[in-house]
Structures are given as structure tokens and as C-alpha cells.
């Protein structure tokens, strides 16, 4: 898995990243109404239509063309008769725009895209009763703010991960246990701090403030009033003076830590594993005491899918135990399917990624598209995604 993850990294420019320079009209803005358009989910599963057009992150729909030994698409095609065509999406914003073209049946959407798709009417509610493997997907991934509205699921969970704190143990000798190491104490590592390059990273600062400055009244890092957003922006602007580089392509973070240009910052477990396999520098990861942000990807069905039956068959296939295990190990994430842990080639894989650890997962605040209608249900005075985009541009200068 470690070497595989590195290989994936070199094939994509920005895995699960956002386009930070887009305008609100390009990104969808996140300023949605109070309810999604009324769209009925599929009522019954029929025969496959013979074709399936997907938008997916690199590594999510492998057909053997990148590595003959890595192929879960061909068996699906043989079993269902659905010929799969995959458009690799490089960013969440790109995926949103591609879905609005009407050419695709489904998408593997991250939480920073899902609500934009739901409230714009680009995706349909999902009838989970038609997806047999849904019943054994981790319960802590179901009916969440990023994949459902008013108890109605809008997709099938695929895999997830935490945004952790990583540090070079040879340089950062006092093991950190707080995000304060890259915020209030970042000056200790001036010019050696790294951070994720995305407007959604504002939530990391908001989470830290939520735990350390209760007087701000932050209850959810994705539901920020103007005052709360400004406080997070101020913290990130101060951090900027100590940042060596912002990363979205995770191979760049691997290179930065191995070269010594970065010694501490936000990361994914797969990055730490990759650095460990190279054995050039020793790093540790920690889930800080404040908790962390995280991501959970969801397979969603286009509202006007030309091949809905094939899409439902795909969602059931990709979350089946053996296939979900394959994807998780190849990509470097926790599988959504609880039974996948029985089929991983690395027997400790699910332990490393805390795949079925509900207590661990409860410490994460998963990426969710900021909306004017606060995603935590607290009111309608929150800042929308387009405001976060503007603020992120301001922070980076």
C-alpha cells in the first residue's frame, strides 16, 4: 500500500483539493436555499443500461490500465454488463462543474462539494434499500451533514480519513499534542510549517479557536458567522508568516519533509506511511487534543443520470467488502465498509486507519460545504463557501 500510495500521488496534481482561485459563480458559492429541489430517488432496481459514466478521484475506479494487478472495474463490467467510462477529477470544484454538464451518471464527491451538488439539484436522493452493502457501512458515516438532508441520504459512503498533525521527530523534539504547534506556537518553526492549500483549511483554524477561545461562540467549524470567520482568518494570516509552503498534491509534502523544508504541519496518514517507507526522515502523526477536520467521500447519483441502474449497481459493487478493501489500500484511506477489514492484504491496515473506530471518528469534523444557512442548524447568518474562497485568497496574498 505504501508504495502504491506514492505512485498514485505522482499521477494526480491535487488529490481531494479545491481550486482556490475560483469565483463564486464557478464554484457554486455554497449560498443555497433552505431546502434542496424535490427529486425522487430511484424506486426499483432494473436491468443495467449497458454503460456508466463516472467522475472519480484518481485511484477510485481502477481498470488495470495503471497497474494490471489493480483492477476492480473489469470484473464489475463482466458481472453487470455496464461499460464504465471514467473521467478523473482533480479538484472538488472541477467535479461540481463536470456534474453540471449533464454528461455523467455519478461522482465520488468529497464533503466540500456534496452540499453544492445537493442544493443545486445536480444529484438525486439515494434509495439505500437498493444498495445491499449499505447495511454494513459504518454507522458513523450515515445521515451526516455532508451526505444527507433532513434524514434523506444523497449518496453512499466510500472511504474517509483524518487531517492529522505530522512532525519531524528529529527537529520537533517535544511531541506536540495540540494544533497550537502550527498556530500560536508556529514561530518556533518559522519557515518550516506547512498547511493544506484550500479554503476548507479555514475550518482547521476555526476548530482550534472553537476549543481555545470559547468566547467566540463557535459550535461547528463549518458554520461561521462573519465575526467568527474573521477570527479564523486572522489566525491563518498570522500563521502565514511561518509557512514554508501550502500543499494540495501530497507528493509535494512528502518531498518537503524529506528535504527538510517542512518539519511540522497538517497531513494525511498515507503521507506519513509513504515517508516512513522511504526511510529518509522519521515522522510521527498525532490526532491533537482539539480533534481534527477530516474527509468522507460519497458516491452520488446524477439527478438526470442516463444510466441510473448501472450507477446503483456500481455503488453496491464499490462498497462490497473485497472491493472496498482493495480501493482503501490502493488509495490510502479508511474503508467505509466494516466487512472490508476482513479482506485487506495488510492485516493491521484497518487499525492504522482506525477504520471501524467510532470513538476516533467522533473526534473528526468532516469537510462540509459552508452555507449561509448554517450547516449545524443554528441559523441563517453563516458565511457561505464563496466568502471562504475570497478570504483564502486574502490569507495567501
Image (cartoon, rainbow, N blue to C red):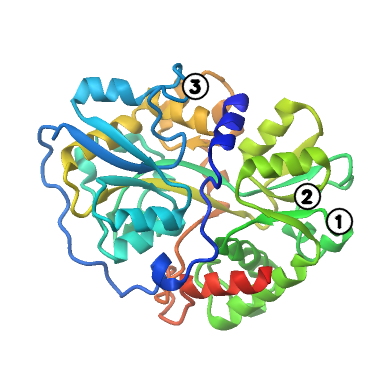
Give percent across and percent down for residue 107.
34, 46
- Do callouts 2 and 1 mark residues in contact (Cβ within 8 Å)? yes
Indicate which label's residue lies in the foreground, 3 or 1.
1
- Residue 189, disc: 1
* 295 to 24, vertically: above or below: above
- Do callouts 2 and 3 mark residues in contact (Cβ within 8 Å)? no
Q: Seen in the image, is 179 located left or right of residue 97?
A: right
Give percent across and percent down for residue 383.
49, 77
Give percent across and percent down for residue 361.
53, 46
Based on the displayed image, in which of its 4 quarters is residue 390 positioned?
A: bottom right
Based on the displayed image, in which of its 4 quarters is residue 315 positioned?
A: top left
Nearest the viewer among 130 and 329 is 329
Give the residue pinned by disc 3.
Answer: 344
- Residue 369, disc: none
For mark 1, give the secondary structure. helix
For mark 2, give the secondary structure. strand
The answer to whether residue 211 of the structure is visible from this angle is yes
Give the residue pinned by disc 2.
Answer: 264
Amino acid at each position: 500500500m505504501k508504495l502504491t500510495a506514492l505512485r498514485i500521488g505522482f499521477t494526480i496534481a491535487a488529490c481531494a483539493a479545491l481550486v482556490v482561485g475560483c469565483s463564486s459563480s464557478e464554484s457554486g458559492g455554497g449560498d443555497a436555499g433552505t431546502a434542496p429541489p424535490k427529486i425522487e430517488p430511484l424506486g426499483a432496481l432494473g436491468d443495467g443500461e449497458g454503460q456508466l459514466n463516472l467522475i472519480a478521484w484518481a485511484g477510485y475506479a481502477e481498470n488495470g490500465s495503471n497497474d494490471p494487478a489493480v483492477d476492480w472495474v473489469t470484473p464489475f463490467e463482466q458481472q453487470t454488463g455496464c461499460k464504465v467510462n471514467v473521467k478523473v477529477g482533480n479538484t472538488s470544484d472541477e467535479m461540481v462543474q463536470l456534474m453540471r454538464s449533464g454528461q455523467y451518471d455519478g461522482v465520488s464527491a468529497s464533503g466540500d462539494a456534496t452540499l453544492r451538488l445537493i442544493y443545486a439539484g445536480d444529484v438525486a436522493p439515494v434509495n439505500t434499500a437498493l444498495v445491499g452493502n449499505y447495511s454494513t457501512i459504518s454507522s458513523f458515516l450515515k445521515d451526516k451533514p455532508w451526505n444527507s438532508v433532513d434524514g434523506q441520504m444523497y449518496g453512499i459512503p466510500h472511504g474517509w480519513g483524518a487531517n492529522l498533525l505530522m512532525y519531524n521527530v528529529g527537529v520537533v523534539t517535544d511531541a506536540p499534542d495540540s494544533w497550537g504547534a502550527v498556530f500560536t506556537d508556529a514561530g518556533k518553526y518559522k519557515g518550516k510549517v506547512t498547511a493544506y492549500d484550500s479554503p476548507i483549511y479555514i475550518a482547521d483554524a476555526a476548530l482550534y479557536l472553537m476549543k481555545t477561545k470559547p468566547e467566540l461562540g463557535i459550535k461547528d467549524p463549518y458554520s461561521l458567522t462573519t465575526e467568527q470567520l474573521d477570527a479564523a482568518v486572522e489566525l491563518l494570516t498570522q500563521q502565514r508568516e511561518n509557512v514554508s509552503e501550502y500543499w494540495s498534491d501530497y507528493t509535494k509534502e512528502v518531498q518537503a519533509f524529506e528535504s527538510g523544508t517542512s518539519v511540522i504541519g497538517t497531513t494525511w496518514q498515507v503521507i506519513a506511511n509513504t515517508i516512513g517507507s522511504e526511510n529518509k526522515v522519521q515522522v510521527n502523526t498525532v490526532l491533537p487534543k482539539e480533534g481534527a477536520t477530516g474527509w468522507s467521500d460519497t458516491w452520488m447519483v446524477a439527478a438526470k443520470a442516463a444510466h441510473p441502474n448501472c450507477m446503483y449497481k456500481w455503488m453496491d459493487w464499490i462498497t462490497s467488502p473485497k472491493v472496498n478493501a482493495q480501493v482503501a489500500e490502493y488509495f490510502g484511506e479508511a474503508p467505509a465498509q466494516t466487512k472490508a477489514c476482513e479482506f485487506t492484504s495488510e492485516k493491521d491496515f484497518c487499525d492504522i486507519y482506525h477504520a471501524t473506530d467510532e470513538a476516533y471518528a467522533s473526534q473528526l469534523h468532516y469537510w462540509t460545504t459552508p452555507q449561509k444557512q448554517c450547516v449545524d442548524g443554528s441559523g441563517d447568518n453563516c458565511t457561505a463557501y464563496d466568502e471562504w474562497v475570497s478570504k483564502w485568497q486574502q490569507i495567501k496574498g
